Amino acid sequence: MLKDQKHPITLPSLIRDFRQLGVSPGMILLVHTSLRALGWVCGGPVAVILALEEVLRSYGTLIMPTHTAELSDPSGWRNPPAPPTWWDTIREQMPPFDPELTPSQHMGIIPETFRKQPQVLRSIHPQFSFAAWGQEAIPLLHEHKLDFGLGETSPLGRLKALDGYVLLLGVDHSKNTSLHLAEYLAAYSSRKIIDSYAPVSIRGHRRWLKFQDININSDDFGRLGRDFSRDEKARIRSGRVGLAEVQLFSQRLCVDYAIRWLEKNRH
């Protein structure tokens, strides 16, 4: 990577790039990230987080997904699958979700570093938690209900109500979690309510709980995102931060477009 990069990416250069893109003080910003896509960053994930917080300022809000999908029923695991003979043991022994202890899974090093920052809060959903910093952190994360964990009453739904923004930092719409919110809000025939399970702690006691969700599916999010990017009303700000291609856009505009797209294209 170093031989392909003329200059190191630094905290000041990240701040400059974020500002040129349109990230501004007071913005409520959900970020999906790939550190590798940025190139070599002096300070790694810490520099990226500090740069975002510097640009947003204390009256802005930074939010990232810190999901833990493996805290689920082992019968649905695919990568890798768990042997059926293990399922009962996993259901009985999997440690419950702990917002301070449980690491995020498959989210990348930037969200995992971010959630450990002292001023950062984390919601309590055992599978779909979010971490947030700044003025709107508590309103976004408060009472993240177990049922329909990416739906209208989740941090994603509250971000839409607050007219927040999404930053895709070196990733495409296949990683755009807000498109799942559209799945909850859209009406299409293949959407089904399902039973989900997770280990949680209730008053200090571990419980294996059942709750309701829908059969979310991101397989067509890449195509959905490409169509959204071509829509003249999307008002996407595109550019580069470091070496990474980035997109900044209104979450509300994106979700509303995705609702219409899903209702037209999913059958």
Image (cartoon, rainbow, N blue to C red):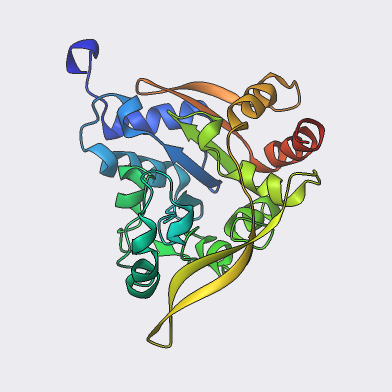
Residue nearest the observer in this picture, 259 or 119: 259
Percent of width and height locating residue 204 = 37, 86
Percent of width and height locating residue 223 = 63, 24
Rendered-image quadrant of the N terminus: top left
The furthest residue to the front: 85
Residue 148: name its quadrant: bottom right
Residue nearest the observer in this picture, 201 or 89: 89
Residue at x 48% of width, y 51% of height? 63
Percent of width and height locating residue 147 = 62, 67
Reply above or below: 3 against 33: above
258 relative position to 143: left or right: right
Rendered-image quadrant of the C terminus: top right
Residue nearest the observer in this picture, 256 or 10: 256
Reply above or below: 38 against 127: above
Residue at x 35% of width, y 67% of height? 90
Whether residue 119 appears in this view of the structure is no
Residue 49: name its quadrant: top left
Residue at x 47% of width, y 68% of height? 198
Whether residue 16 appears in this view of the structure is yes
Percent of width and height locating residue 123 = 48, 65
Reply above or below: 131 against 224: below
Reply above or below: 103 against 207: above
Residue nearest the observer in this picture, 176 or 26: 176
- Counting labels gives 0
Residue at x 69% of width, y 46% of height? 183
224 relative position to 77: left or right: right
